[in-house]
Amino acid sequence: QVQLVESGGDSVQPGGSLRLSCTASGYNISRYCGAWFRQTPGKERERVAGIYPAGRYPHYADSVQGRFTISQDNTQNPMYLQTNSLNSDDTAVYYCATSIRATGCRAFGSTQYQYWGQGTQVTVSS
């Protein structure tokens, strides 16, 4: 049974940083497309970062480009999302997601990811 578990969410001040982790069990996370999404109440889930198998070709939403970094090495280690220069617009529940596909990752919407974690809360407030 595949299970994804996120950790690392917290409350931080504007300008702060957090590293979110996504640990997989029953699944080799390095072999498939992966991503981080976020969601706030009343809004659609937004993909903020995606990655190809073995951590290749990271890609980002414009809203986080230059501030967030997605990573995953070519092992069964966790998938990470390093978040820097956080602001109040980054407040959300963050979810990791993975697919059963290994190609075309950049074009994926939320429906192309089959496995989801339970989410971790990130709150940015002074």
Image (cartoon, rainbow, N blue to C red):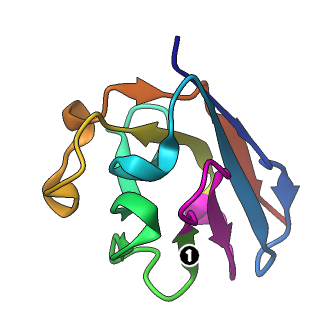
Say what secondary structure mark 1 lies in.
strand
Left or right of 83 on screen, residue 62: left
The quadrant of the picture occupied by the C terminus is: bottom right
Q: Quadrant of residue 20?
A: bottom right
Q: Classify 62 as above or below 5.
A: below
Q: Which residues are magenta?
A: 71-90
Q: Is residue 88 in the magenta section?
A: yes
**Residue visible at 47% across and 75% down in the picture:** 64
Q: Position of residue 70 (x, y in %)?
A: 53, 68
Q: Looking at the picture, tell me which residue is in the foreground, 118 or 126.
A: 118
Q: Position of residue 22 (x, y in %)?
A: 64, 44
**Label 1 belongs to which residue?**
69
Q: Position of residue 33 (x, y in %)?
A: 33, 50
**Kind of residue at badge 1:** Thr
Q: Classify 97 as above or below 117.
A: below
**Residue visible at 28% across and 34% down in the picture:** 100
Q: Is residue 66 in the magenta section?
A: no
Left or right of 112 on screen, residue 81: right
Q: Looking at the picture, tell me which residue is in the foreground, 66 or 2.
A: 2
Q: Quadrant of residue 60?
A: bottom left
**Residue visible at 52% across and 10% down in the picture:** 1
Work out which residue is located at the far top of the displayed protein and give it.
1
Dot 1, crowdedness within 10 Å: few (<14), some or many (≥20)?
Answer: some
**Residue visible at 48% across and 52% down in the picture:** 30
